[in-house]
Image (cartoon, rainbow, N blue to C red):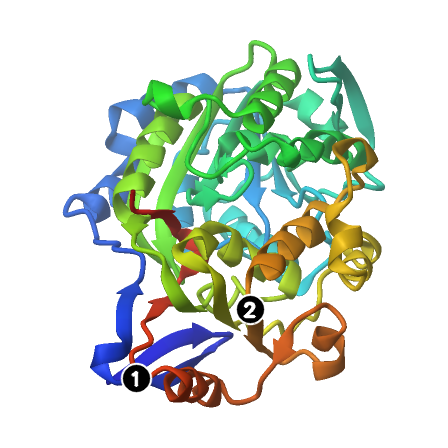
């Protein structure tokens, strides 16, 4: 049988005898029957009518996901902009967090926003890319954990907020969600660094959040710290959200409403569509989901964090990540790539008190590589770069699979595609 997995803007095809297939896992997204009507007629919905009343002659701030995130821009923007007439002023901010602000993908987002602005004839607006290093910041104090709350001063102009979010599992923040648009989305580097040191807490995991409807999924210290910081920034101002589940620009599910209510519904929907309980396999092939999910290695790693528990100790992974943009942003190299090039024991000896932003990535990579027999990767990255960080580069994924079968004709191989939007758990 032939199995195709996403790789950059292309596909990688693997041939596998059917008896060697342990499973083939992909997001089980299905279009909601009422979806098209709910967006086309968005302005007629009760929630939208309330939102439109609230923004009349008031200053609205729209917080947008950046170019490393998947979002159904072309489907969602026209009906959403139909709600904006009557606002006194609208600020559009691309929430880059600690990602590089000035990128082609982020500029493309602003171009989409400007196109809609011209379509509806909006005259009072600004549209900017947040930069965690050079933006002008306001200070909202500290959280109980000690995280400094330094946020983009543009937010102080707003009377009301709207976030756009494609909701998925996030390996240490629980889910991508409206809170993250604020923190770290439009905050300073120092804010993200202090908060992200909580990645060392095992409760900082995917599939949990203080807003989750299930009480057993609310204990999440890192997400709770983010939420406390957001509340300090927002104070009593309303926060609305358009939340979606989409893939490659195709919209499958959407809700519009007050942020907490909309996000809670999205968490449940994400659980239903992208969460799997699987029997761990001895070999696994993982694709983050192609562009933009494997734009660079820093981004692509999310896929491994969300799926690695489906691989037995002593097993092997073949990772299909094109990484046309390299290892990651220049600012990530020192505490991501350079640290990952150190001996595994050195990486794993790091303590939370020594945390520097981005260093959770090499720590987690080292944890995974340490428990494997081999980590294979098919990528556009130079083989020497990959070999230096404990990986086995291959230009021929089929050869790796053939080698597994030659070694053990009964080997079971698990295929995972679209892994950046999945959450795997071992069956118990």
Where does residue 410 sit, x and y in percent of width and height? Answer: 29, 79
Vertically, is 154 above or below 232? Answer: below
Label 2 environment density (alpha carbons within 10 Å; few <14, some 14–19, many ≥20) = few
Q: Residue at x 73, y 58 (%)?
A: 344
Which residue is tagged 2? 373
| Residue nearest the viewer, comparing 160 with 196 | 196
Vertically, is 72 above or below 317? Answer: above
| Residue sitting farthest toward the top | 236
Marker disc for residue 151: none
Q: Is residue 244 left or right of residue 399?
A: left
Q: Is residue 37 left or right of residue 120?
A: left
Report the quarter where the C terminus lies.
top left
Q: CA distance from mark 2 to mark 1?
A: 21 Å
Vertically, is 98 above or below 208? Answer: below
Q: Is residue 25 visible?
A: yes
Cβ atoms at labels 2 and 1 below 8 Å apart: no
Q: Residue at x 31, y 84 (%)?
A: 409
| Residue nearest the viewer, comparing 45 with 334 | 334
Q: Residue at x 53, y 29 (%)?
A: 203
| Residue nearest the viewer, comparing 77 with 333 | 333
Mark 2 or 1, nearer chain start:
1
Where does residue 392 sit, x and y in percent of width and height? Answer: 63, 77
Which numbered mark, 2 or 1, is in the foreground of this view? 2
Q: Is residue 193 left or right of residue 8?
A: right
Q: Secondary structure at mark 1?
A: loop
Label 1 environment density (alpha carbons within 10 Å; few <14, some 14–19, many ≥20) = some
Where does residue 184 sit, x and y in percent of width and height? Answer: 66, 35
Q: Is residue 75 visible?
A: no
Which residue is tagged 1? 16
Where does residue 40 sit, x and y in percent of width and height? Answer: 26, 45
The quadrant where residue 378 appears:
bottom right
Report the quarter where the N terminus lies.
bottom left
């Amino acid at each position: 049988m032939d199995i195709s997995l996403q790789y950059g803007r292309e596909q990688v095809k693997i041939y596998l005898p059917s008896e060697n297939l342990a499973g083939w896992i992909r997001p089980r997204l299905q279009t909601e029957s009422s979806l098209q009507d709910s967006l086309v007629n968005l302005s007629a919905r009760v929630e939208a009518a309330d939102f439109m009343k609230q923004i009349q002659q008031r200053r609205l701030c729209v917080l947008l996901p950046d170019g490393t995130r998947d979002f159904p821009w072309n489907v969602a923007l026209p009906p959403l902009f139909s709600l904006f007439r009557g606002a006194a002023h609208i600020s559009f901010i691309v929430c880059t967090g600690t990602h590089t602000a000035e990128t082609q993908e982020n500029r493309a987002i602003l171009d989409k926003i400007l196109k809609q602005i011209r379509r509806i004839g909006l005259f009072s607006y600004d549209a900017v890319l947040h930069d965690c290093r050079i933006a002008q910041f306001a200070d909202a104090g500290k959280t109980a954990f000690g995280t400094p709350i330094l946020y983009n001063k543009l937010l102080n102009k707003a009377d009301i907020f709207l976030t756009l979010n494609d909701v998925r599992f996030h390996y240490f923040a629980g889910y991508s969600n409206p809170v993250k648009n604020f923190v770290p989305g439009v905050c300073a580097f120092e804010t993200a660094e202090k908060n992200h040191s909580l990645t060392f807490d095992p409760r900082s995991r995917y599939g949990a959040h203080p807003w989750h409807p299930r009480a057993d999924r609310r204990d999440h210290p890192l997400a709770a710290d983010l939420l406390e910081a957001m509340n300090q920034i927002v104070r009593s101002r309303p926060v609305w959200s358009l939340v979606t589940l989409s893939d490659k620009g195709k919209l499958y599910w959407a809700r519009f409403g007050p942020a907490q209510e909309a996000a809670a519904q999205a968490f449940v929907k994400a659980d239903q569509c992208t969460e799997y309980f699987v029997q761990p396999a001895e070999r696994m092939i993982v694709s983050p989901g192609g562009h933009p999910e494997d734009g660079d290695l820093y981004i692509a790693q999310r896929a491994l964090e969300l799926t690695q528990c489906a691989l037995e100790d002593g097993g092997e992974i073949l990772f299909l990540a094109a990484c046309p943009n390299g290892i990651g942003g220049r600012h990530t190299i020192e505490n991501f790539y350079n640290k990952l090039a150190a001996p595994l024991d050195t990486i794993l000896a790091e303590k939370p008190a020594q945390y520097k932003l981005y260093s959770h990535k090499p720590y987690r990579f080292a944890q995974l590589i340490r428990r494997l027999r081999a980590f294979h990767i098919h990528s556009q990255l130079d083989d020497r770069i990959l070999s230096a960080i404990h990986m086995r580069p291959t230009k021929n994924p089929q050869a790796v699979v053939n080698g597994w079968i030659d070694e053990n004709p009964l080997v079971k191989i698990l295929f995972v595609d679209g892994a950046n939007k999945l959450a795997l758990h071992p069956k118990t």
